[in-house]
Amino acid sequence: MCLALPAKIMTIDEGSDMATVALGEVKKEVSIALIEDAKINDYVLIHVGYALNKISPEEAERTLQLFAEAGLTE
Amino acid sequence: MGIEGFLDIQLTMNESVICDVEILSSRPVYASQVFVGKPVIESLNMLPLLFSICGVAQACAGIRACEQALGHQISSYAEQVRDKLVRMETLREHLWRIFLDWPNFLENQSLNKKIQTQTMSDIIKCQQDYRKFLTSGSNPFLLEQDISPVSTENSQPIRQLNRLLEKSIFAMSPAQWLEIDTIEKLQYWYESSETVTANLLKKIHQNEWQGLGRNNTKGLFTSTTDALESEGFDLSTLREQFEDKNFVKKPQWYGTCCETSSLTRVDSALLQDLYNYWGNGIMSRLVARLTEMAQIAHSLLDDVEQPIQNFSKNRSDILGDGDGIGIVSAARGLLIHHVCIEQSQIEKYQILAPTEWNFHPQGVVAQSLIGLEGGKEQINRQADLLINAIDPCVGYKFHIV
């Protein structure tokens, strides 16, 4: 099942188009080259080291809630 | 390990030959149960967010299952739009995995990171533009959405995608590449081209690995409902299978493990020729994926007004009220959603992904790995290549004992 957690952008390095994102307690470096106008605090879906698209904070919250309900984020 | 789970593959070696394979899965195959008790509309909205990697295919299987369960009629145009969007996603997924994975199998070829990112970005842009044009901003994967036919096809995103394929994958237009119909012509192509795809086929030829992983696993039934019905396939049999909770974890069809992938759904004179020589070995697998990409790119250039053959029709007359099955040919293989709806709420939601067919403990991956021989380093390389050729998107680790 191809699941992807919403991650929150914490910092951005504009020179390299890389960002540090937070997936819960875990922080990760990802490329933000594939999305336009990425900003700190935006939520993005991550796949194979790339932020694929932005989602709204409401969608992110709802998705994370669903993951929690499914017991996937324990 | 991520939330997507992973596959733990143990290869048992005896005198330099892999004689047994054990596959343990921690994939969250029951994640769709989160929709139970929720309204249908909310569930359909959440589907592509929860299962976001092949989100279009997931949304398409979901809406098809729900429409059937609810007995909703759907225009053939809307089905054509969905079908085109799924095929576009399949093409994007194939392209991405080639750019990400195939250079890793070539010692002397590293893809420039900037070019790689730019290409992936271009693909996303083509996909977005195409969807925007076909749907005028509406969502074709929600209930009772009215998708109006567009008067003329805007082929710009598709033309751009064809150019991208020509430059990076085929070294000629996809339509020209589809004219390659024999092993000899294929060999000439990969020996005279310098794309990452040609170079990987060249390497397989040089190592004489064409038949690597060859086995007798059967192909799963193909795709559309029309095709299934013409094959005498009874959808109620499929519904009965879903009564067994284990079906979505370790699926079999009439007691047999089956494969579902590009190889089991794409056909051409070239693939027939390859199959005659190498069976379902790695050369046939990789060429099947390339063939599928070329066929999709070429077919998407067709006029949007041209009716699509074999698109699914409403099947509410076959299954009972409130019970629906949605089938989609996703990038990795057949994706099946089964839903039971009671008073507009989800009572049961099951998803059977292609990975579970292919990585069944006795399935095509296990059968492909049995019989590999050589040193551990070579077997590692071959196993990686085979697994990637069958399903490039799954998280796995393997170890040889």
Image (cartoon, grey):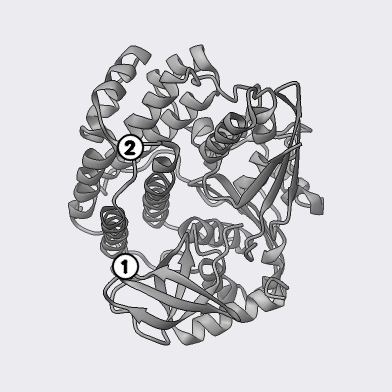
> Is residue B346 in view?
no
In the picture, measured across the screen, residue B109 lies left or right of residue A26, that is left
Image-quadrant location for residue B228: top right
Element type at marker 1? loop
Q: Nearer the viewer, residue A23 or A29?
A: A29
Under mark 1, the amino acid is: Ala
Query: Which quadrant would the N terminus of chain B be assigned to in this image?
Result: bottom right
Relative height, residue B13 to residue A54 (above, below): above
Neighbourhood count class around disc 1 (C-alpha, 10 Å): few under 14, some 14–19, many 20 upward:
many
Query: In percent of the image, x 60 and y 25: which residue is there?
Result: B213
- In the rendered structure, find residue B288 and report the number of the disc placed on it: none
Relative height, residue B66 to residue B111 (above, below): below
Query: In percent of the image, x 59 and y 60: which residue is there?
Result: B71
The residue that disc 2 covers is B196
Image-quadrant location for residue B342: bottom right
Neighbourhood count class around disc 2 (C-alpha, 10 Å): few under 14, some 14–19, many 20 upward:
many
The residue that disc 1 covers is A33
Query: In percent of the image, x 68 and y 78: which residue is there?
Result: A68
In space, the residues marked 2 and 1 are separated at their CA atoms by 22 Å
Q: Nearer the viewer, residue B370 or B381?
A: B381
In percent of width and height, residue B138 lies at: 36, 70
Relative height, residue B205 to residue B351 (above, below): above
> Is residue B286 in view?
yes
Query: Which quadrant would the C terminus of chain B be assigned to in this image?
Result: top right
In percent of width and height, residue B161 lies at: 25, 48
In percent of width and height, residue B145 lies at: 42, 69
Under mark 2, the amino acid is: Val
Element type at marker 2? helix
Relative height, residue A17 to residue B390 (above, below): below
In the picture, measured across the screen, residue B119 lies left or right of residue B260, that is left
